[in-house]
Image (tube, rainbow, N blue to C red):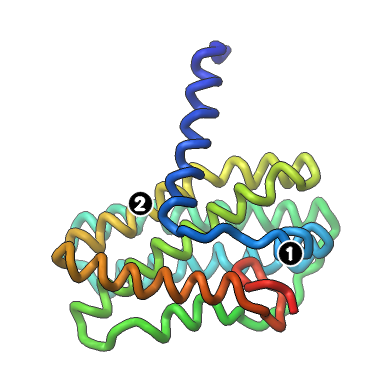
Amino acid sequence: MPTTSNIVSRVASTDAIVLEIQDFLGVCTPEAWVSHALDDLATLLIDHANCEYKAAATGMSLITKYRNKPRLQRLMARLVREEMLHYEQVLVLMDQMGVNYRPLTASRYAKTLRDAVRCDEDGRLVDTLLVGAIVEARSCERFAALWPRLPIRLGKFYKSLLRSEGRHYQDYLSLAREFADTSDVEQRLIHFLEIDQTLIETADDEFRFHSGVPA
């Protein structure tokens, strides 16, 4: 049975993860997006499932392309395993909540970030890792914004994802710093965070897990 001190430690750790990610991103999710999400849980869950699947696919793509990078292989193998578990868990919740899957168009968020990735081999790897870090950080930030206001079962699930999403962001960021010098990483990070801010704060025609302010 967990002691009170262990429970406090875990809560503090979760709070620390959220604070770190909010500081990293610099911009929090607008209240208008959160309010819209709470009124459209079906779309939220369907797109969340899509995001987990795509995150696993990104990890597999990196594993396939960079077999000569042992640490990347290990971290991405763990990430793929966890993202597919999350995908399965979201599907179970959808079934329990009576949410039927329907095709959704991809949001502008990930596509816009990916379109800004450099084309040369070294630049592409570093930028892809930085985009991965920002996407995972934004996911974690949105779970933190949502979970206290969701139905209990869904809220508990989203809170449980904070640790893994926070670790995924750290893994991506540490890998980017391993494969490029500090000045390049920081410069590119500023560039991608500016894109993230624009996408999060501006009006968006479609509601998605990573969309901007609902138009």
- Coordinates of residue 180 in the picture (x, y in percent): 16, 67
Q: Label 1 near label 2: C-beta < 8 Å?
A: no
Q: Disc 2 versus disc 1: distance between alpha carbons? A: 28 Å
Note whether 159 is above or below 52 in the view shown.
above
Q: Residues within 10 Å of mark 1 (few under 14, many from 20)?
A: few
Task: Kindly identify which numbered label has been placed on residue 170.
Answer: 2
What amino acid does circle 2 point to?
Gln
Relative to 182, is 126 above or below?
below
- In this rendering, the count of numbered labels is 2
- Residue 201 in picture, x, y percent from top left: 60, 71
Q: Which mark is residue 148?
A: none
Residue 169 vs residue 71, the one in the foreground: 169
Rendering coords of residue 215 (x, y %) = 75, 79
Lateral position of residue 47 relative to residue 121, left or right: right
**Which residue is more in the foreground, 124 or 65?**
124
User: Which of the image's four quarters has the N terminus?
Assistant: top right
- The x, y position of residue 207, in whole percent, is 71, 74
Residue drawn where x is 53% and y is 76% of the image: 198
Name the residue that disc number 1 marks.
32
What residue lies at 35% left-to-right and 75% top-to-bottom? Answer: 191
Q: Is residue 31 above or below residue 164?
A: below
Left or right: where does residue 173 sit relative to residue 136? Answer: left
Q: Secondary structure at mark 2?
A: helix
- Which callout, 2 or 1, points to the residue nearer the camera? 1
> Does any portion of residue 185 appear in the rendered image?
yes
